[in-house]
Image: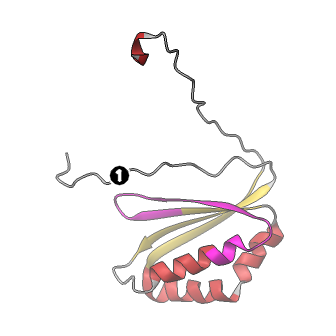
Amino acid sequence: MSDHPEAPVAPVTPVEAYQPPYYVAVFTTVRTQEQSGYGDTNARMEELVRAIPGYLGMDHAQTPGGLGITVGYFRDADALAEWRTNAEHRAAQKRGQDQWYESYTLHVAKVERSHGFVRALVPQDPQSPAAG
């Protein structure tokens, strides 16, 4: 049991299951202690990638041990290539190698199958004992 107070948990919604084919870029990272400028640069990168036609969305997770996992979803290879070759993104990659990342790995894949599940909210029967 942790002696740290639990932070409020925000609602979590994964990116929807898009109609294949589409592409994913899976970026796994371990960051350094030196993070000055990271937050502003990350916000700018999110702004830039959202402006790319064919960008579908992003999921991000962080493990307690410090592994970051970001998955970017792109409709086609052209959208992914536009992101990969964006000049500001390239500069941020260089700064990441020089300053922010201890290590990282990038995996790019074409998604050929995708499905999802969302538990529907079932209205409670007002006559049930649990409703009272």
The percent coordinates of residue 17 (x first, y second) are 70, 46
21 sits left or right of 49 in the view: right
Which quarter shows the N terminus? top left
The percent coordinates of residue 70 (x first, y second) are 55, 63
| Residue 120 quadrant | top right
Residue type of the residue flagged with mark 1: Pro
The percent coordinates of residue 47 (x first, y second) are 63, 76
| Residue 91 quadrant | bottom right
- Name the residue carrying label 1: 8
Which quarter shows the C terminus? top left
Depth check, front residue: 47 or 55: 47
User: Which residue appears at 40% of the width and 10% of the height?
Assistant: 129
User: Which residue appears at 46% of the width and 78% of the height?
Assistant: 39
Depth check, front residue: 89 or 131: 131
Looking at the rendered structure, the secondary structure element under dot 1 is loop
Mark 1 nearby-residue class (10 Å; few <14, some 14–19, many ≥20): few
Is residue 77 magenta-colored? no
Q: Which residues are magenta?
A: 47-69
66 sits left or right of 45 in the view: left
User: Which residue appears at 66% of the width and 39% of the height?
Assistant: 116
